[in-house]
Amino acid sequence: MEDNFAIQLFEGKKVRIVWDEEQEKYYFSVVDIVQVLTDSMNPTDYLKKLRKRDPELGSFLGTNCPQVEMYTFTGKKRVTLAADLQSIFRIIQSVPSKKAEPVKQWLALLGEQRIDQMIDPELTFQMAVEDYRRQGYSDKWINERMRSIEMRKELTDEWQRAGITEHIDFAILTNVLTQAWSGMTTGEYKRLKGLTKENLRDNMTNVELALNTLAEVATTELSRQRNPKGMAESQQTAQAGGKVAKNAREDLERQLGRSVISSERASDHLRPIGDNPTQELPFDSTDKDDKQ
């Protein structure tokens, strides 16, 4: 879900949303919805008290609302209590608010927009561009990231055609590919950059992102030509595709006289907030106990 994060505004208030591709549904930050409904200065505390006053709601949230990774206002990712549309409507029923009906209409509109995006994928890309700009990424980096997303989708489609269906297998193939071109596993690469659960591609520099995209494009083309079947053959193809990018990396490093892989993150070069008066960082209603 982490590549499908977005911020939506309701009457100027921010609501964090994640689109789950597998289940084809939105997950909303519960505390953000509560803040929209109540205008509370401390929506997390309000939600805690609400759960105590309404044990049935508390039980419902515990059973139906998962913890989902979302950005905080400081740009970090934290697990956050989240709910799908059906569960959000249940929560709205338990919160006394004059905004209940407008919020319901707004949620219905978001659902309609998602259908439009599924019909016209370009709308999804436009939404992602706006989100990255809001976080402060440069247009040059965003363009490279959008290309990488498109190429990644082509690769995963090719893996599916080869019979790969399990999440763990996609992760294994990605790890093989990453290690082949960078010399590090995905976990080692993330540790180099000081990442935990953050998306590695969102923290690659322009050069790293270009090389990773080259590895994925090469793997896709080789897979189409070799027509691998199953995991073992797909791993061999991923290794070969990664080697194409490895050769390009080593050639560039020889000419530069330095490594192009570093602990530097793309987010280290985000535009200061003052450079763009319309720019917003990812929303965080609270940075400590957002899980409630």
Image (cartoon, rainbow, N blue to C red):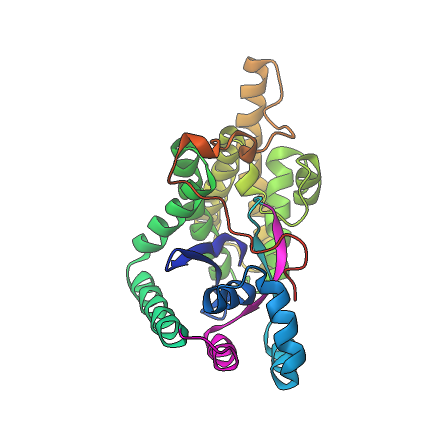
> Can residue 80 be spotted in the picture?
yes
What residue range appears in magenta? 76-98
**Along the horizontal axis of the image, is 244 left or right of 191?**
left
Residue 100 falls in image quadrant = bottom left
Observer-nearest residue: 73 or 39?
39
Relative vertical location of residue 147 with respect to residue 49 in this rendering, above or below: above
Across the whole image, how many numbered discs are drawn on residues? 0
Q: Which of 163 and 279 lies nearest the eye of the viewer?
A: 279
- At 45% from the left and 42% from the top, the residue drawn is 217
- Horizontal and vertical percent for residue 13? 43, 57
> Residue 57 in the image: x percent, y percent?
60, 82
Q: Which quadrant is home to the C terminus?
A: bottom right
Q: Position of residue 105 (x, y in %)?
A: 34, 73
Magenta-drawn stretch contains 90: yes
Q: Is residue 168 above or below residue 275?
A: below
- Residue at image coords 29%, 64%: 116
Q: Is 195 situated left or right of 165 in this image? A: right
User: Within the magenta stretch, is there residue 267?
Assistant: no
Please indicate, yes or no, whether residue 232 appears anywhere in the rendered image: no
- Which residue is depicted at the point 56% across and 44% down? 75
In the image, residue 235 sits, relative to residue 11, either above or below, namely above
* 163 or 150, nearer to the observer: 150
- On the image, the x and y values in percent for residue 265 come to 58, 33
